[in-house]
Image (spheres, helix red, strand yellow):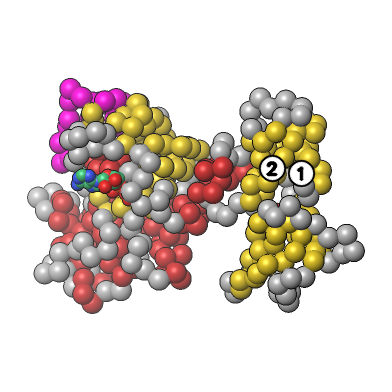
Amino acid sequence: MKAISIRDLSSGYGGDPVIRDISFDLEEKELLAILGPSGSGKTTLLKTIAGFLPAQSGLIKLDSQVVSSPQKIVPPEKRNIGLVPQEGSLFPHLDVSANISFGIRRNPKKTQRVAELLEIIDMKEYAHARPQELSGGQQQRVALARALAPTPKLILLDEPFTAMDTSLRAQMRRDIRNILTLTATTAIMVTHDQEEALATADQLAIMQDGRLIAFGTPHELYEKPASQDVASSLGEVNAIPATVESEHSVNTELGTFVARIMGDAVLGQHGIVLVRPEALTIEETDSPNAKITGSVFHGHDSTVTVSTNSGMVLKVRESQQHDRVPGTLCAVKVLREGIFLK
Ligand code: ADP
């Protein structure tokens, strides 16, 4: 069953639409990450789904009911949607239990529901703590429990981990994912962090300039991007001029190698082949095709920049530490299948 269906949606702040022609479906219990650079329209889409902005055209259905169209707008409080804002959204004068029960204050079963949620977020012993006594990660778990208390159909998370440091973010991603799975909740999370989106989501929506440029599973979009923009939204990628040589191979300055030919490209077609930095390797050789120009150490790996004989700049990821001296001649080779695009 579809939890949410969006068709040809355009929306904005009164003038020209900020987001245009958005269409996708999300199944129940799935987590969708909306990924895109700042200003691409992610928050505008989230606000339109929540009912804070009207649809200028198109429609949004929740559980098969139209909640937004140019003729209709169901108000946010009638949508059965839970919101988890960025950090710092808890009521400081209320303890953890009172924060969680805020949206179900008049429900006779609220004590039982709060106990259940404290268990799920693994914070039973903090029931009477104040928000300011909690870490950032604990505060966000409470904010999620507060949003889950009325058993919403859908949870919207707006950059929920922005203010956290890297190791806490990774832990929080796992926690939030587990809590959503345990409660069988459908969720949509906005993020500008590709790693977060790839690691957390069942489905990914990539936005650029107010449009949806890709929708699919993290694997599909990473392995078979439909454009260079989609590929580079999910991590660094080299775009190498190429010609289709056979059904499964392309010819490039680096030689002939295996590639997935996308779309209706024919033999002899000119285009580009996308190759991730981790799919390239550097060898010292008597017949070089490139020169090392720089190297950046990241701890778990390094990125080496090379310039090919024709002057093309490529990035190569190396997981083992080598001493790469700028100016050294080398041979760059392709280890894995590339993606050919017209
Ligand atoms: P993102 O969440 O991807 O950073 P937003 O949805 O916040 O992007 O913004 C998309 C565009 O909408 C931006 O160009 C921004 O200037 C514009 N915008 C955002 N908020 C408002 C507003 N309240 N009024 C008018 N324009 C806005």
Q: Magenta region: which residues?
A: 57-79
- Mark 1 C-beta to ligand 1 under 8 Å: no
Question: Are circles 1 and 2 on residues that touch, CB within 8 Å?
Answer: yes
Residue occupying image coordinates x 24% and y 37%: 12
Q: How many neighbours does mark 1 have within 10 angstroms: few (below 14), some (14-19), or many (20 or more)?
A: some
Q: How many neighbours does mark 2 have within 10 angstroms: few (below 14), some (14-19), or many (20 or more)?
A: some
95 in relation to 61, above or below: below
Mark nearer the N terminus (1 vs 2): 2
**Left or right relative to 315: residue 127:** left
Q: Position of residue 173 (x, y in %)?
A: 43, 60
Residue at the far right: name it: 286
> Does 62 lie within the magenta span?
yes
**Left or right relative to 149: residue 163:** right
Residue located beneath label 2 in the image? 241
90 in relation to 133, above or below: above
Instruction: Locate the C terminus by quadrant.
Output: top right
- Mark 2 C-beta to ligand 1 under 8 Å: no
Q: Nearer the viewer, residue 229 or 206?
A: 229
Q: Hey, which quadrant is residue 287 in on the image?
A: bottom right
- Residue 252 has which mark? 1
Q: Hey, which quadrant is residue 300 in on the image?
A: bottom right
Q: Nearer the viewer, residue 223 or 169?
A: 223
Q: Secondary structure at mark 2?
A: strand
**Left or right relative to 155: residue 342:** right
Amino acid at circle 2: Pro
Amino acid at circle 1: Thr
Residue occupying image coordinates x 27% and y 63%: 87
Residue occupying image coordinates x 33% and y 43%: 41
